[in-house]
Amino acid sequence: MVFRLLDGTDPHFPIGYTILAAVKSRQPQRHMNHNTDLQEADNTMDDQALTYARRVLLTSLVIVGMGFSVLFPLLAPIGREMGLSEFQITSIIGASSLAVFLASPIWGRLSDSLGRKRVMLIGLFGFSAGTILFNSVLNLGLTGALTGSTLFAALIVARLCHASVMSAAMPAATAYMADITTVENRTKGMGASGAANNLGSILGPALSGLAVFSLLLPLWLIAVLAFLNGLFVWRFLPQSPKAKIKRTVKGPVLKYTDPRILPFIIVGVLMFMGFALVQQTMGFRFQDALGLSAKETAQVLGLAMMLSAGASLFAQGIVVQRLKLAPFDLLRVAIPLLIISFTIMALFQTQLMLTLAMGLQGFAMGIAGPAFMAGASLAVSTEEQGSVAGIASSCGPLGFTVGPIFGGLLYQINPVLPYAFAATVYIILMLSMGHLRKSITS
């Protein structure tokens, strides 16, 4: 019995991630290897095998999305309960994101030589172990066993250890999706991956609602789910149809400054910076504007994040799948919507308007995310998919390094400044889109 994941093959369900009730799924035998010894599979998959592989991968990404999102509604109120400042709280995310930024390209290249599945498993089991370590330090802070600068340093170290290993999962998963899609359906494949991740981002904040019983309960549960997810991938995910690359002669290393992908990298970093700035400061915004307690903040922000992720899921599942637009054109649709959402966040302080602004931001990110990933993937050769997946996957962490730090500093000066700053950056980006596009076609 496995969760069946619709991946776009059913004309009545063109989106690739609706989880149905646990039903029997016939596992295709041809061209597949379900053994758990991590031996390399055949270099080909028939259509049935590809469909099965997509379903397993997308199911796993739902749990990954839950793991990434469950902390966001909780960290701000937990940090304040422990006596940390806004800058210290956002710096924890910023430091861990920097570690992911540095490690993701390395894991992406390793997935070319070690295999996608092996590297993905390292990330999933590492996520579980790192979450247990981080939760343990949080518990020491909440009980008063650690305080002040010692607590802050311990949280930074624990989060760095966590991030360095768990960062293996996403570039390996992204490269796996590139391996099982064609040039023609690459954007839809990346959209399905993003949608599965966003479905998890709906369930993650929902799980954070259990904070009414204990602020750390959702985080302990996600550590268990991450471990079970690793077992699920180990047992059911076939090896990638792309053979491991044996690097007898070291080829050129794909760089961030490669002119084929540089425009997408610039857009991606700035896009995720704005998204991270909002994710890491809206907890303070809700709590201060509405006068909420720590547990109330986790609940209200969790609902807003669920709406944001749901809107993103709709955008990726309906809009991206049906619009016949090139990746860069999708970005030109999304960026003005992001500017509007940041402007609303700066001008309004009611729960309704702040929640609607987060929903609009989620919708825009749902359009922009797969466009960014597909554009970078399509810009390079088949042999460079692992490398480009690592680089593209690191753009989010780089944005989450800069965004929370700027957001925390600006929020301490004035609660409006983070969102005004983000809107200004996106206006500059929108005005630069024409020049960036010319650099792709030239």
Image (spheres, rainbow, N blue to C red):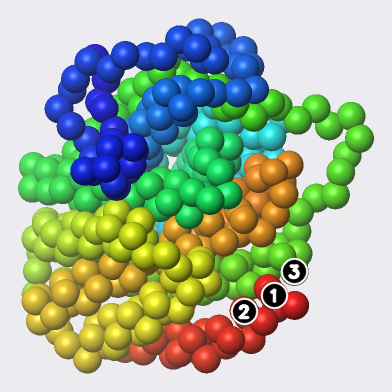
Task: Provide residue 73's location: percent of width, then percent of height.
Answer: 24, 57
Residue type pointed to by label 3: Pro
Whether residue 404 is visible here, answered yes or no, is no
Residue pointed to by mark 3? 259
Q: Judging from the image, what secondary structure is the residue with disc 2 in?
A: helix
Instruction: Tell me which amino acid carries mark 2.
Output: Arg
Location of the C terminus by quadrant is bottom right
| Residue 21, placed above or below residue 315 | above
Left of 187 or right of it: where is 27? left
Distance of label 2 from label 3 (alpha carbons)? 11 Å
Q: Is residue 12 above or below residue 74?
A: above
**First in residue order: circle 3 vs circle 1:** 3
Residue bearing the label numbered 2: 437
Q: Are circles 3 and 1 on residues that touch, CB within 8 Å?
A: no
Are discs 1 and 2 less than 8 Å apart at CB? Answer: yes
Which residue occupies the foreground of this view, 295 or 228? Answer: 228
What residue lies at 28% left-to-right and 80% top-to-bottom? 341
Residue lying at 52% horizontally and 91% vertically, measured from the top left: 431
**Which sits in the foreground, 320 or 159?**
320
Binning the other alpha carbons within 10 Å of mark 2 as few (below 14), some (14 to 19) or many (20 upward) gives some
Mark 1 neighbour class, 10 Å CA radius: few under 14, some 14 to 19, many 20 or more: few
Where is residue 438 shown, x and y percent of the image? 67, 82
Q: How far is the residue under mark 1 from the one under mark 2?
A: 7 Å
Q: Nearer the viewer, mark 2 or mark 3?
A: 2
Residue 179 as seen in the image, left or right of residue 360: right
Q: Which residue lies furthest to the right in this view?
A: 249
Which residue is denoted by mark 1 in the rendering?
A: 441
127, above or below 340, in the image: above
Disc 3 residue crowd, few under 14, some 14–19, many 20+, Cα 10 Å: some
Which circle marks residue 37 in the picture?
none
